[in-house]
C-alpha cells in the first residue's frame, strides 16, 4: 500500500504531455493583432514624387516671395504653402529646421521690410534644396 501511494505521489509531479507540439495547433484568429488593427499610415507618394512635389512647392514659395509687397493676404498664402511644405519634406532636422525658420520669418513680416523677408525666404528655400539634394 505504501509502495502504491509512493508511486502515485512520485508520478503526479510531472505534467501530462501536451496533445500536440507547441506552435503546431491550428486555431482560427478571433481578433486582429494590435499592429494590424491600427497600421501606420504610409505616404501616398513615392520618394521621387515627394521630391517633385517639394521642388514645386519651393518654386511656388520663391515666386510668391518675389511678389511680396507686405499685404496680409500674401503672407497668408505663403503660410499655407510653408505648412504644406512641412508635410512633404523628409523628416530630418537638417531640413525641418529651415522650414520652421520660414514660419518664423513669416511671423515677422509686419515688422520687417518686404525686401528683407523676400531675401530670407529665398535663402531658406535654397538651403532646403541643397540639404535635400546632398
Image: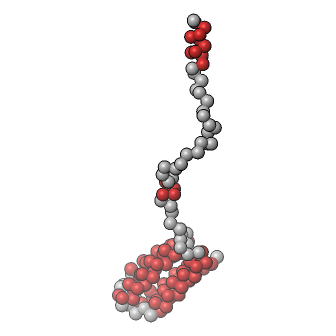
Q: Which residue is at 48% across, 75% downward? A: 86
* Residue in the foreground of this view, choosing between 37 and 84: 37
Does 27 appear above or below 46?
Answer: above
Q: How is the image coloured?
A: secondary structure
Does 100 appear above or below 9?
Answer: below
Is residue 119 found left or right of 129 in the rendered image?
left
x%, y% of residue 101?
Answer: 47, 76
Q: Which residue is at 54% across, 80% downward? A: 54
* Residue in the foreground of this view, choosing between 94 and 39: 39
Quarter containing the N terminus: top right
Tell me, yes or no, if residue 112 can be seen here.
no
* Residue in the foreground of this view, choosing between 112 and 38: 38
Quarter containing the C terminus: bottom right
x%, y% of residue 37?
Answer: 48, 57
Tell me, yes or no, if residue 92 can be seen here.
yes
The answer to which quarter of the image holds residue 67 is bottom left
x%, y% of residue 90?
Answer: 55, 72
Q: Which residue is at 55% across, 75% downward? A: 45
Q: Which residue is at 56% across, 77% downward? A: 50
x%, y% of residue 62?
Answer: 50, 88
Does 126 appear above or below 12?
Answer: below
Does 134 appear above or below 121?
Answer: above
Amino acid at each position: 500500500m505504501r509502495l502504491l501511494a509512493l508511486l502515485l505521489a512520485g508520478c503526479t509531479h510531472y505534467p501530462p504531455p501536451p496533445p500536440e507540439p507547441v506552435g503546431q495547433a491550428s486555431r482560427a484568429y478571433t481578433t486582429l493583432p494590435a499592429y494590424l488593427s491600427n497600421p501606420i499610415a504610409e505616404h501616398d507618394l513615392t520618394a521621387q514624387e515627394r521630391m517633385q512635389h517639394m521642388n514645386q512647392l519651393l518654386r511656388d514659395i520663391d515666386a510668391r516671395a518675389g511678389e511680396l509687397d507686405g499685404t496680409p493676404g500674401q503672407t497668408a498664402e505663403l503660410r499655407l504653402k510653408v505648412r504644406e511644405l512641412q508635410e512633404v519634406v523628409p523628416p530630418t532636422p537638417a531640413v525641418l529646421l529651415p522650414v520652421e525658420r520660414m514660419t518664423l520669418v513669416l511671423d515677422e513680416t509686419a515688422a520687417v521690410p518686404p525686401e528683407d523677408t523676400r531675401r530670407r525666404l529665398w535663402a531658406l528655400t535654397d538651403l532646403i534644396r541643397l540639404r535635400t539634394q546632398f
